[in-house]
Image (cartoon, rainbow, N blue to C red):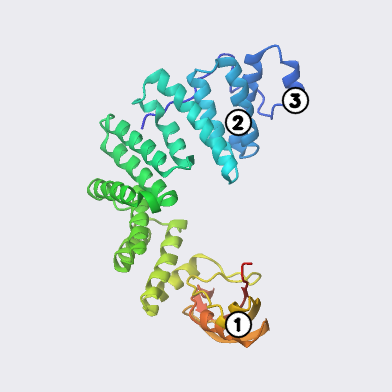
């Protein structure tokens, strides 16, 4: 994919400028030379990206100082705005609004300079789609991206943008744009299966999303087929453990348990256990959990409770020999907590390459939202 890159700037020398963060004093001393201020600010941004430290602060300074140098309608200003939007850390409506505004500014500039159907606008369109609060706007931005991709005479790029669109719509707007997300995904998946090797990153991403759609429709066998394909790819083609493989194993545990196929889930519990060491110092995280039912009589009177339990995780990851260590609120909470945790599955502890039984604890808190 062709992407618009920030141009080399007059007076900017990566080999000679200091990589230290731009100080307030330095800025003050160079106030009468905007180009020098920007050059040092941009160099500081590059150094921050490399060190993965202070990226947001330096990206903002590069954007504001660059805008002074290059003006409101320069490609450089647009790309600096995109850099700054990508550097913003944190969550929340205000931060998303800030990101959206920056991507919108960049898109306005790039569309004016290159045309609304230009490849240069793609990053800005994707950014707007990601941070708009409107499902309909997001779908419109993504449709524009795909139409632009079709002009590039690159079928894989089109498929990649469809996968990007499907992922974004499914993540943020599935309640309103489910059909569009599903159609984009199926079209991308069809291309990948015909044209890419099974161990390509694109096929793995598509398999995950296809599995998620299938699970959402309670088509568990279809989801299991996709996730098992991911596991097989890692087992057969890649010689390292990967977070995607862990995620696939974990999802398979849950799907098999939902079908009552606990024995089929066991091999995935064991696979995870071999990849992730047991940590005695912290509470173990279940691979599959059933939420306890709030006792009716307790809910009626808005009574809170908590239960601390100890149990054995056996060599297959089943919960055994569960006992209550302490509780608050009465026996009804204890019974509910026990009934739930007995159905949980864990990755067992491994010692010397073999699974062994180990003890763990959990605390369940029952609270009514008042």
Q: Whole-percent x and y of residue 224?
A: 33, 66
Q: Quadrant of the C terminus?
A: bottom right
Q: State yes or no: discs 2 and 3 in contact (Cβ < 8 Å).
A: no
Q: Please tell me which residue lies in front, 346 or 167.
A: 167
Q: Which circle marks residue 24 in the picture?
A: 3
Residue density around tag 2, few if under 14, some if 14–19, many if 20 or more, within 10 Å: many
Give SS at disc 3. Answer: helix
Name the residue carrying label 1. 333
Q: Residue 244 falls in which quadrant of the image?
A: bottom left
x and y percentages locating residue 276 in the rendered image: 52, 65
Q: Is residue 16 in view from this perspective?
A: no
349 to the left or right of 231? right
In the orientation shown, which residue stands out farthest toward the left?
194
Q: Quadrant of the N terminus?
A: top left
Please give the name of the residue rendered at 33% of the width and 63% of the height, measured from the top-left corner.
217
Q: Is residue 292 visible?
A: yes
- Residue at the (65%, 15%) spot, across then down: 34
The quarter of the displayed image where residue 333 is located: bottom right
Residue 31 placement: quadrant: top right
- Taking depth in this image into account, of 128 and 191 the one nearest to the observer is 128
Q: Is residue 347 above or below residue 75?
A: below
CA gap, disc 2 to disc 1?
Answer: 52 Å
Residue 161, image x and y in percent? 34, 40
**Mark nearer the N terminus (2 vs 3):** 3
Q: Label 2: which residue? A: 59
Toward the front, the furthest residue is 300
Lower position in the chain sequence, tag 2 or tag 1: 2
Direction from residue 236 to residue 80 in the image, left or right:
right
């Amino acid at each position: 994919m062709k992407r618009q890159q920030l141009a080399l700037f007059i007076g900017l020398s990566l080999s000679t400028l200091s990589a230290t963060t731009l100080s307030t004093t330095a800025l003050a001393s160079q106030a009468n030379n905007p180009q020098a201020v920007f050059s040092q600010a941009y160099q500081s941004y590059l150094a921050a990206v490399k060190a993965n430290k202070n990226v947001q602060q330096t990206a903002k300074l590069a954007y504001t100082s660059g805008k002074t140098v290059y003006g409101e309608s320069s490609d450089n200003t647009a790309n600096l705005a995109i850099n700054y939007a990508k550097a913003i850390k944190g969550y929340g409506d205000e931060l998303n609004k800030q990101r959206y505004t920056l991507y919108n500014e960049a898109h306005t500039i790039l569309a004016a300079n290159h045309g609304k159907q230009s490849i240069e606008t793609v990053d800005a369109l994707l950014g707007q789609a990601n941070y708009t609060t409107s499902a309909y706007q997001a779908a419109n931005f993504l449709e524009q991206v795909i139409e632009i991709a079709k002009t590039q005479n690159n079928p894989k790029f089109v498929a990649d943008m469809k996968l990007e669109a499907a992922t974004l719509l499914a993540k943020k707007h599935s309640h309103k744009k489910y059909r569009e997300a599903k159609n984009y995904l199926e079209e991308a998946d069809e291309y990948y299966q015909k044209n890419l090797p099974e161990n390509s990153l694109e096929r793995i991403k598509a398999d995950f999303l296809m599995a998620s759609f299938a699970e959402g429709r309670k088509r568990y066998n279809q989801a299991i087929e996709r996730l098992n394909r991911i596991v097989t790819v890692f087992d057969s083609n890649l010689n390292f453990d990967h977070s995607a493989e862990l995620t696939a194993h974990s999802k398979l545990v849950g799907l098999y348990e939902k079908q009552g196929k606990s024995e089929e889930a066991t091999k995935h519990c064991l696979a995870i256990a071999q990849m992730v060491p047991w940590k005695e110092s912290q509470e173990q995280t279940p691979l599959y959990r059933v939420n306890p039912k709030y006792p009716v009589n307790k809910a009626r009177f808005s009574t809170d409770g908590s239960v601390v339990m100890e149990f054995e995780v056996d060599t297959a990851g089943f919960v055994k020999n569960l006992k209550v260590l302490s509780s608050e609120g009465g026996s009804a909470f204890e019974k509910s907590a026990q009934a739930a945790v007995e159905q949980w599955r864990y990755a067992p502890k491994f010692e010397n390459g073999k699974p062994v039984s180990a003890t763990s604890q959990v605390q369940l808190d029952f609270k009514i939202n008042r």
